[in-house]
Image: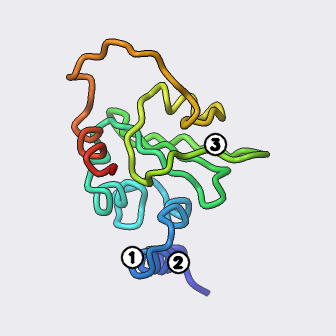
Amino acid sequence: MKNETERMRELYDQWQTQGISKQAVYNQNGIGYHKYSLAGLVRNELGFDPASGDIFVFLGKRLNQIRLLQWDWDGFAMYIKKLEQGTFEWPQSENIAITRHQLTLLLQGVMLDSVRLRKRYQQTNQVTKQEVKLAQKVP
């Protein structure tokens, strides 16, 4: 019988070679810094610093579970929410940056594509480096 680390490596390698959804890998992993953890995937696959303080959102394969990973001064914090019924909605692009307000709406079950916000003033220094980097990846 395979241990958990071997199983995670297989899932990781399978995703690498076959392009299988990353979410299938994320929900098998813990928080730590090893290669197959959530923090390891943020660093190695997405190219971001997991200890930046930004919140990284991972959606489960069945879209009924969401994980939020954030560095909180002295260690990682993870929030997990699994829906008893229904699914989470995720925007069309796979790797995107969303605002805190959009994250709140996502957790409450609001479809982000149908939300229209009125124009508001926003200082440019409030946008993180990672949001800019992600925004450049979105077509």
The mark closer to the camera, 1 or 3, is 1
Is residue 60 rendered to the left or right of residue 44?
right
Q: Mark 1: which amino acid?
A: Gln
Instruction: Give the mark, 1 or 2, whose residue is nearer the N terminus.
Output: 2
Residue 96 position, x and y percent, is 39, 46
Of the two numbered discs 1 and 3 on the same chain, state the one appearing first in sequence.
1
Q: Residue at x 32, y 35 (%)?
A: 53
Q: Where residue 66 sits: x, y (%)?
A: 58, 47
Seen from the viewer's position, the closer of residues 38 and 91 is: 91
Percent x, y of residue 104:
54, 28
Under tag 2, what secondary structure?
helix
Residue 76 - label: none
Judge left or right: residue 3 versus residue 17: right
Q: Which amino acid does the dot numbered 3 rest on?
A: Lys
Residue under numbered circle 3: 81
Q: CA distance from mark 1 to mark 3?
A: 27 Å
The residue singled out by tag 2 in the image is 7
Q: Quadrant of residue 69?
A: top left
Height in image: 99 above or below 23? Answer: above
Residue at 42 percent of width and 61 percent of height: 37
Q: What separation in Å lies between label 3 and label 2 (alpha carbons)?
A: 23 Å
Q: How many marks are shown on the rendered structure?
A: 3
Residue 16's disc number? 1
Q: Is residue 77 above or below residue 44?
A: above
**Left or right: 4 as drawn, with respect to 109:** left
Choose mark 1 or mark 2, whichever is in front.
1
Could you tell whether 100 is left or right of 134 in the image? right
